[in-house]
Amino acid sequence: MDNTLLVRAVRYATERKQAEKALQESQKQLMQSEKMACIGQLAAGVAHEINNPVGFVMSNMGTLVGYVAAFKEVIAEYEKLAAAVSNEDGDAHSPILTRIEEIRTRQELPYIMEDVDKLLAESADGAERIRDIIQNLRSFARTDEGQLKEVDINQGIEATLKIVWNELKYKCNVHKTLGDIPRVQCYPGRLNQVFMNVLVNAAQAIEERGDITIETEALDSSVVIRIADTGRGIRPEHLSRIFDPFFTTKGIGKGTGLGLSISHGIIESHNGTIHVQSQLGKGTTFTIRLPIKAANDE
């Protein structure tokens, strides 16, 4: 009898400890999700603040191009006039012509006339790139998540790629086969977070130069996304735990173990599925399947 009570007491204590640990992990995961949401809101706010000055910089650049063209036209006529005056009565105007030529030489006017167009073009291109980054950041960190939206998944992937490009460009070549797919009812910012987590994990799994392949296709009433890498792969004994909270095969300080767990939860909240296949030493493939219409859509 005493042994039975002891066994029950030990079992109760063990179950309680496991429940407390599970609760703590859930709380930590919730805190991480809230942190990601705050980061998303901050990023969206920063993007909005940057977007306004970039707008008038680009507008001013367009106006400046016109101004420079006008200056160049006038300068060209001045040079024709200087040449004509020099030929007709060079001695009378010699001091002025000499001064003009000195300024022209000192300021390297021919070089400036040639270089100014390049500078304007490069500046306009730079401002255009900043605007693209801002648009992608705003798309990635969307805060209008209160309701489902019909979204082009391919656009979400493209936007996420630009956000994480610095993580990828030094380690891999990215190959895309984005199919002609229907729009999907989803929470776009959350799905972009999933794409980010999987892509960053793929890059981190590649030890030297490798490849990441992204494919999308419509299949039955779903859209399928496959993200494959040629990284080191996942050990078979780890595959069943890959979506567990706080499980990570990365070194200390290199991962929280929450990214794939959160991603799994996001996909499930869309009534979708996410699966992983891996071969040690050859690479890993994540397959995400999302219903085109939400479960509660009529």
Image (cartoon, grey):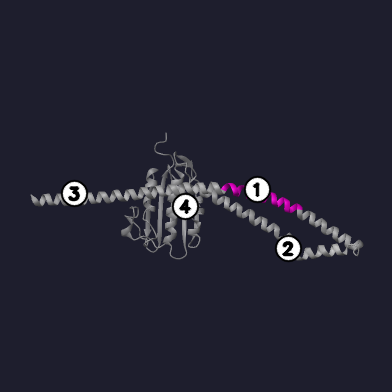
Could you tell me which secondary element the residue under label 2 belongs to?
helix
Q: Is residue 287 left or right of residue 2?
A: right
- Upstream in sequence: badge 2 or badge 1: 1
Q: Is residue 133 visible?
A: yes
Q: Amino acid at mark 2?
A: Tyr
> What crowding class fits label 3: few (fewer than 14 Cα within 10 Å), some (14-19), or many (20 or more)?
few
The mark lying in front, picked from 1 and 4, is 1
Q: Which residue is mark 3?
A: 12
Characterize the magenta stretch by its predominant secondary structure.
Answer: helix
Task: Please tell me which residue lies in front, 82 or 194.
Answer: 82
The mark lying in front, picked from 3 and 4, is 3
Q: Where on the picture, by quarter, is residue 255? A: bottom left
Q: Which residue is mark 1?
A: 59
Residue 36: where, in percent of width, then height? Answer: 42, 49
Q: Is residue 114 left or right of residue 205?
A: right
The mark lying in front, picked from 2 and 4, is 2
Task: Please tell me which residue lies in front, 224 or 168.
Answer: 168
Cα gap from disc 2 to disc 3, whole angstroms = 84 Å
> Are discs 1 and 3 less than 8 Å apart at CB?
no
Q: Amino acid at mark 1?
A: Ser
Q: Which residue is mark 4?
A: 215
Cα gap from disc 2 to disc 1, whole angstroms = 26 Å
> Are discs 1 and 4 less than 8 Å apart at CB?
no
> What crowding class fits label 1: few (fewer than 14 Cα within 10 Å), some (14-19), or many (20 or more)?
few
Q: Which residues make up the magenta segment?
A: 51-70
> Are discs 3 and 4 less than 8 Å apart at CB?
no
> Number of marks in the image?
4
What residue is at 82 percent from the left and 64 percent from the top? 99
Q: Which residue is mark 2?
A: 111
